[in-house]
Every structure is written in C-alpha cells, then in structure tokens.
Image: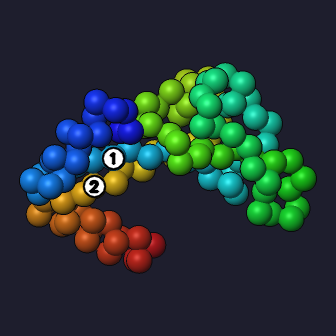
C-alpha cells in the first residue's frame, strides 16, 4: 500500500476516479490478552505495544501503527499459529462502485437489525 512504487500508481488511479482498495490491519483492544506472542512470531516493526484503555487490564496490548504497508504478515502469522483472535483486516474502498455501495447499505441494515 505505501510502497514507493505503488504510491504513484494508486494516486493516479484515485485521480482518474477508479476504484482503489486499501488494506488496513489492526488489533482489537478488548480481545487482546496481552501475551504478545503475535509480536514475537511476526517480527513486523509496525506491530508494537500500547497501554490498555481498560483499567482492569494490567498488561499492555498489541497495536498496529500507521506505518503499516498492508503486507498481511502479522495477521497471517497470528491466525496460522492460532494464537490471537484479536487481529482484524479492514478494506477501505475509495471511489466505490454501485455494487460496493449496495453491499455497504445492506450491511448497515443488517447490523442495525441485530
């Protein structure tokens, strides 16, 4: 995503109004247990620790910083070793198509109903 050779291509596609998908990874603070085995396995420099917002948790939780390039190594290592269910992957769509908008509308309806 943030690689030097990809950045101009993505900027040109955005300027042309094309659909561009960015991948972001993160860690859910509430589900993270704080054992940091995900950090030891992946070796990703953007996977760090931060203080927990929950006052009942004494251990710091894992955190993915904004320097993430979206390679997916951290999430794959955590899920392959079945270590951490707190990793999530989000796709951010710029210039969505009509079908993308329809899917988002349907998802909002079903989430409200649940």
For the rendered model, the colour scheme is rainbow
User: On screen, 66 above or below 81?
Assistant: below
Closer to the camera in the image, 111 or 30: 30
User: On screen, 84 above or below 58?
Assistant: above
User: Is residue 94 toward the left or the right of residue 72 in the image?
Assistant: left
Q: For the residue labelled by badge 1, is the local secondary structure a helix, a strand or a loop?
A: strand
| Residue shown at the point (59%, 44%) measured from the top left | 64
Image coordinates for residue 12, horizontal then vertical, percent:
16, 46
Image coordinates for residue 103, horizontal then vertical, percent:
23, 62
Q: Which of the marked residues, 1 or 2, is nearer the chain's N terminus?
A: 1
User: Is residue 19 toward the left or the right of residue 94 in the image?
Assistant: left
User: Is residue 26 toward the left or the right of residue 15 in the image?
Assistant: right
**Quadrant housing the C terminus:** bottom left
User: On screen, 107 above or below 87?
Assistant: below
State the CA–CA distance, disc 1 to disc 2: 6 Å
Closer to the camera in the image, 76 or 114: 76
Circles 1 and 2, Cβ within 8 Å, touching? The answer is yes
Residue hosting label 2: 93
The quadrant in which residue 6 appears is top left
Residues packed near mark 1 inside 10 Å, few (<14), some (14 to 19) or many (20 plus) = some
Q: For the residue labelled by badge 2, is the local secondary structure a helix, a strand or a loop?
A: strand
| Residue shown at the point (34%, 72%) measured from the top left | 108
Residues packed near mark 2 inside 10 Å, few (<14), some (14 to 19) or many (20 plus) = some
Residue 73 makes an appearance in the image: yes
| Residue shown at the point (46%, 32%) measured from the top left | 72
| Residue shown at the point (42%, 50%) measured from the top left | 90
**Quadrant housing the N terminus:** top left
The quadrant in which residue 47 appears is top right
Residue hosting label 1: 22
Residue 78 makes an appearance in the image: no
Image coordinates for residue 76, horizontal then vertical, percent:
51, 28
Image coordinates for residue 100, horizontal then vertical, percent:
19, 59
């Amino acid at each position: 995503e943030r690689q030097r050779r990809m950045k101009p291509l993505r900027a040109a596609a955005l300027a042309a109004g094309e659909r561009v998908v960015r991948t972001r990874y993160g860690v859910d603070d509430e589900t993270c247990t704080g054992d940091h085995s995900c950090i030891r396995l992946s070796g990703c420099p953007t996977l760090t620790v931060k203080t927990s917002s929950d006052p009942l948790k004494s251990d710091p939780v894992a955190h993915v910083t904004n320097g993430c390039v979206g390679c997916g190594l951290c999430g794959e290592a955590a899920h392959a070793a079945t270590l951490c269910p707190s990793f999530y992957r989000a796709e951010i769509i710029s210039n969505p198509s009509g079908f993308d908008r329809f899917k988002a509308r349907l998802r909002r309806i079903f989430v409200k109903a649940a």
